[in-house]
Each structure stands twice: as C-alpha cells, then as structure tokens.
Amino acid sequence: MADTVSTIEDLNQEQTARLVMDVMHRTIIHYALWFTEIRHQMGMQRALEALSVASQKSIGIQFNRLSQILGFEMHDDIPGPLLNMPKTKLLKLLDAAAVNWLANDGVWFQAVEFASGMNDAKRCNDSCWAHFSPFEAWAIKRFLDIGDRSGLEGLKKALNFRVYARINVQSFADDGPDAFIFRMNACRVQVARKNKNLPDYPCKSAGLVEYTYFARAIDPRIQTECIGCPPDAHPDDWYCAWRFYLIK
C-alpha cells in the first residue's frame, strides 16, 4: 500500500471496501476463537451453553446494525430480503452457502497439505471433524428442537439437515428394528476426482470420526459401524456406507 496511506480516511474506494471485508473476516475469527477458548478452558458443554446465548444476541446485533446501513428491514432478527425471496431462490442461496462451506474446508486442507504434506493435512482434518461433527449435531438439534434421546429417527432427521445433505446424494435403508444403513450415493468431492480420472480420496479416517461423533452427539446410545469408505472398495452406487444401531 502506498506510503501516503496512514489513516483509514486516506484509503480509496476499493481499499475501503477491502477493509470492510477484512474487518468482517476478523469478526468471524474472533467469534470462533471465543468459542474454542471457552471449550479449551471449560469444556464443550459449557462452550455450547455460552454459544447458545452469545450467538442469538450476536446475530441480532450484527444484522440489525447492517440493516441500518444497507437499507433493509429486519423481522424477528431475520433480514427482510431473505423472507421476501422466492423459496426456489432461497434454496439456491442455501445450496451456495453449503458449497461455500465445502470449498472453505478444501482450501484449509490444501493450505496445510501444500505447506506440510498430506499426513499433516489429514491429521488436522480428522481432528477438525472431531470438533465440528458434535457442534453440527448440536446446531441441528437446536434448530429442530430435537431432544437428547431421539433415537434412530432423530438421527435420520438430523442427517437430512447436515450441510452435506445439500451437496451430496444420500439414502437410508432400515436394517431391522434397531438399526439403519446410511449411504453416500454421490459425494461431490469424490465425483469431482472421478471426473478427473483420479482415485478416490481416502476419507475413512475422517469418516470414522465424523459419523461416530455426530451420531453420538444426537443420542449417546447410538453406535456407528463403517460398512465401507475409501480407500475401501465400494460399488458404483455409493462411496461410503455406515450402519447405525441403538444400544438400549
């Protein structure tokens, strides 16, 4: 940046716009750091309790302030443009947000992979899932008002509300009265690799963490069994498959 810039008022239009984006990014990181530090010092349950209170207040404060600057109305802490958007377009926005989440996951993975190698990237990825899966389960339970012992039906419903559910193609099949099989029929990451004639990404280590922790966070009585996940061989109609069963 030019030596003539010493205060924010010295920035031009483009530089000021970039600073606005940067401050928003700093806010996101600071928000995440608060959560991770409470989790580190007080444990996951206390962190989620704090998050429940802080997130409700924070979202309202931030969107209400932005609405005053950007000129949109708020209705019960929901931006008016979202409420007025056609459902089809709102679902497209949801899908875009879901794909952005996946892209964000990928750029973080590659940032570690290119700097430190695949092993470190996979190790960080698996550890990240150990934290994100129970958090996503908590967020879905809170959104849907699902109880702590909702059983297999609760897990089925929750799996349909994961971010992945808007990106991939998945299916369910009952396996007796106290179990069901969940299949990922089309995985965006694996399909993209297949289209480039690349082998499957070996995601089993992450999947074991991801699905086990998610199911357990929905209902601690639910156990998870991997039927197959890359690098395991699999049929053409699914990439990974998981069996969930209830211990009464």
Image: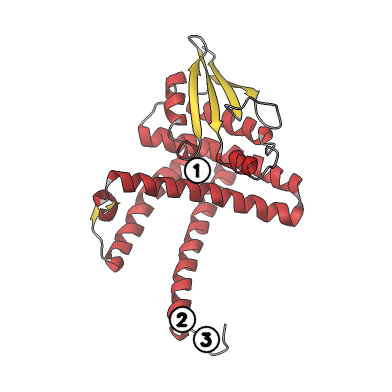
Toward the top, the furthest residue is: 176
Give the label, 1 or 2, closer to the camera.
Answer: 2
Expressed as whole percent of the image width and height from the top left, the position of residue 155 reads 46, 25
Q: Which element type, helix, strand or loop, lies under badge 3?
A: loop
Q: Please name which of the two marks, 3 or 1, marks the residue nearer to the observer.
A: 3
Q: Is residue 164 left or right of residue 122?
A: left
The answer to which quarter of the image holds residue 139 is: top left
- The quadrant of the image that shows the N terminus is bottom right
User: For the point 55% across and 41% down, which residue is it?
Assistant: 188
Q: Which residue is mark 3?
A: 5
Determine which residue is flagged by label 1: 47
Q: Amino acid at mark 2?
A: Ile
| Point 55% across, 52% down: residue | 104
Tell me the distance, in whole angstroms, between the alpha carbons under discs 1 and 2: 35 Å
Residue 99 relative to residue 199: left or right: left
CA separation in Å, label 3 and label 1: 41 Å
Tell me the residue at 57%/86% (across/down): 2
Q: Which residue is mark 2?
A: 8
Q: Whole-percent x and y of residue 217?
A: 51, 29
The residue positioned farthest toward the bottom in the image shown: 4
Identity of the amino acid at label 3?
Val
Q: Residue at x 26, y 65 (%)?
A: 71
Disc on the earlier residue, 3 or 1: 3
Disc nearer the start of the sequence (1/2): 2
4 w.r.t. 173: above or below:
below
Considering the numbered disc 1 on the image, is that residue within a helix, a strand or a loop? helix
